[in-house]
Image (cartoon, helix red, strand yellow):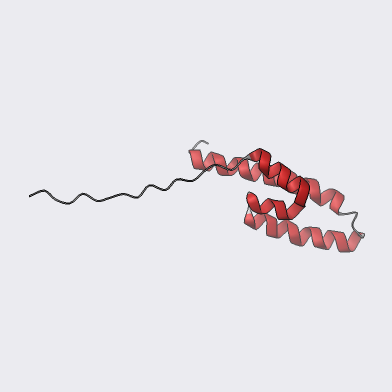
Amino acid sequence: MSSPQAVKPVVSVSPKSVGIAIILTVLFGPLGMFYSTVAGAIIMMVVSVVAAVLTVGIGLLVTWPICIVWGAVSANSYNKKLLGTP
């Protein structure tokens, strides 16, 4: 009699596109960051709202580019972890 073999499930996860992360954050700012990082999007939403209120919207000129860079770096970092490269 042969022993039953354990079936190992295979989970396939696709990488995130850095280009799409940049486009989404350029168009939607902190909301676009939800594609690449949920925690970063929540943090930047709070920071952007506070900056916008305190500076009558001018603070968004600083927070928006930060969102773009953070989203791109986060998508790239996710891909590196997914592929197991340092």
Q: Nearer the viewer, residue 24 or 56?
A: 24
Q: Nearer the viewer, residue 61 or 2?
A: 2
Question: Quick check: 58 left or right of 2?
Answer: right
The residue located at (71%, 59%) in the rendering is: 43
From what the image shows, is residue 56 above or below residue 66? below
Q: Nearer the viewer, residue 26 or 63?
A: 26
The quarter holding residue 45 reads bottom right
How many marks on residues? 0
Q: Residue furthest top?
A: 85
Residue 66 visible: no
Residue 69 coordinates in the image, percent (x, y): 73, 43
Q: Residue furthest left?
A: 1
The residue located at (80%, 49%) in the rendering is: 64
Residue 40 coordinates in the image, percent (x, y): 67, 54
From what the image shows, is residue 5 above or below residue 79? below
The residue located at (77%, 48%) in the rendering is: 27
Question: Quick check: 71 left or right of 60?
Answer: left
Residue 39 coordinates in the image, percent (x, y): 64, 57
Residue 8 coordinates in the image, percent (x, y): 31, 49
The quarter holding residue 31 reads bottom right
Residue 11 visible: yes
